[in-house]
Amino acid sequence: MSESGESELIAQELSGLGHKLNEFEKRLTEVEKVNARLEVAALTTARALQEVSQHWDAVYEAMRRIEEPGVHELRRERDSRRSTPERKS
């Protein structure tokens, strides 16, 4: 093979590699865009889950307060004593 033939073959190979590199760069750009959208979606999901978790914490706290003997029972006892007339001996 002559030098010009070898140069032409090398030029064709380089041209083919250049086209492949351009396609690869386009695909990489698309992957980066998708990745950015997925990161935003992940952050949104994390915030929503945190909000749901806070609501459940409030529910559990309210349930705990209801189950504990506390202010409500003391008020009921006080009110029942007030409604019952005191007997004088």
Image (spheres, grey):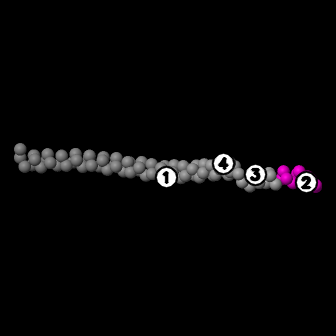
Structural distance between the alpha carbons of marks 1 and 4: 30 Å
Amino acid identity at mark 1 = Leu
The answer to whether residue 5 is above or below residue 71 is above
Q: Nearer the viewer, mark 1 or mark 4?
A: 4
Give the left or right position of residue 75, taking residue 57 as reference.
right
- Residue 63 marker: 4
Task: Name the residue rendered at 76%, 51% in the picture.
Answer: 73
Query: Quick one: label 4, few (<14), some, or many (20+) residues within 10 Å?
Result: few
Structural distance between the alpha carbons of marks 4 and 3: 15 Å
Whether tag 1 and tag 4 are in contact, CB under 8 A, the answer is no
The image position of residue 48, as x and y in percent, is 55, 50
The image position of residue 23, as x and y in percent, is 30, 46
The image position of residue 82, as x and y in percent, is 87, 54
* Residue farthest front in this picture: 89
Query: Element under label 2?
Result: loop
* Residue farthest left in this picture: 2
Amino acid identity at mark 2 = Glu
Residue 61 visible somewhere in the drawing: yes
> For mark 3, what is the residue?
73
Task: Name the residue rendered at 75%, 52% in the picture.
Answer: 72
Whether tag 3 and tag 1 are in contact, CB under 8 A, the answer is no
Whether tag 2 and tag 3 are in contact, CB under 8 A, the answer is no
Query: Quick one: label 2, few (<14), some, or many (20+) residues within 10 Å?
Result: few
> For mark 2, what is the residue?
86
- Residue 43 marker: 1
Amino acid identity at mark 4 = Met
Q: From which residue to which does the magenta span run?
A: 79-89
Structural distance between the alpha carbons of marks 2 and 4: 35 Å
Residue 55 visible somewhere in the drawing: no
